[in-house]
Amino acid sequence: MTDERMAAGARTSLPAWPERVEVDPSGRCFALLGVGDEASEIIRGWLRSVDRPVWTLQADDAASASESLAAQLREARVGWRLMLAGHEVDVLALRSQALSAGALEEEVRCQVTARERVVVHCAHCATDTEVMAVAGDRTVCGGCGQLLHIYSHVSWLRGSHLGFRADVEAFR
Ligand SMILES: [Zn+2]
């Protein structure tokens, strides 16, 4: 966690993910949702420390977890807590879904297992493109085909990074 990208992230709106995330002791019931193989060990650890009603799901990607999460969100009551584990791009997407459905930031905890994949939101055509990249890299927009510079600015409500035309960025 000491590489330059992490240090740069600390100065921007990129989330500073904690190394180790514990279950919120004030929660009354929990939804534990893991995406990807790396998440299963984290989910097992959380399960061991929960002695209250708990729902768990292990999914291959954020899209396949989305419908189950929506059902959980509809039933959520006071004291409900969502714990997400997985790749940053999946965690951001599911977190955005929860917040959009009315969950509070304090009700959602995230443990990120990796972060070399991002969703880039094109500032020019509004297309979201998922790519193997990190903030600071360049990528081609899947919508308008322009070369985008990937900013470390993350939209919490969309879960995506902002992308601007790379040649525009060069003149700043
Ligand atoms: Zn575009």
Image: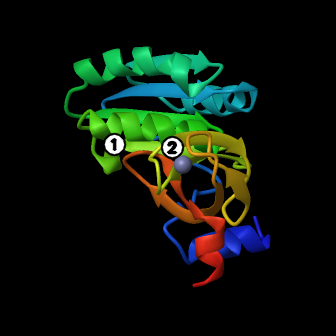
Say left or right for 22 vs 131: left
Give percent across and percent down for residue 148. 63, 59
Determine whether 72 is above or below 110 in the image.
above
- What residue did someone put label 1 on? 107
Extreme residue toward the right, this view = 3
Give percent across and percent down for residue 96. 40, 41
Q: Determine whether the residue tagged by mark 2 lies in a helix, strand or loop.
A: helix
Query: At label 2, which amino acid type do we have?
Result: Leu
Say left or right for 22 vs 112: left
Mark 2–mark 1 distance (CA, rounded to whole Å): 14 Å
Which residue occupies 33% across, 15% down? 71
Quadrant the N terminus occupies: bottom right
Give percent across and percent down for residue 28. 30, 30
Q: Is mark 2 within 8 Å of ligand 1?
A: no
Asked which quadrant contains residue 130, the reply is top right
Of the pair 86 and 18, the residue shown nearer to us? 86
Of the pair 78 and 104, the residue shown nearer to us? 104
The tag on residue 92 is: 2
Determine whether 55 is above or below 172 in the image.
above
Say left or right for 114 vs 47: right
Which residue occupies 60% across, 75% down? 169
Of the pair 36 and 128, the residue shown nearer to us? 128
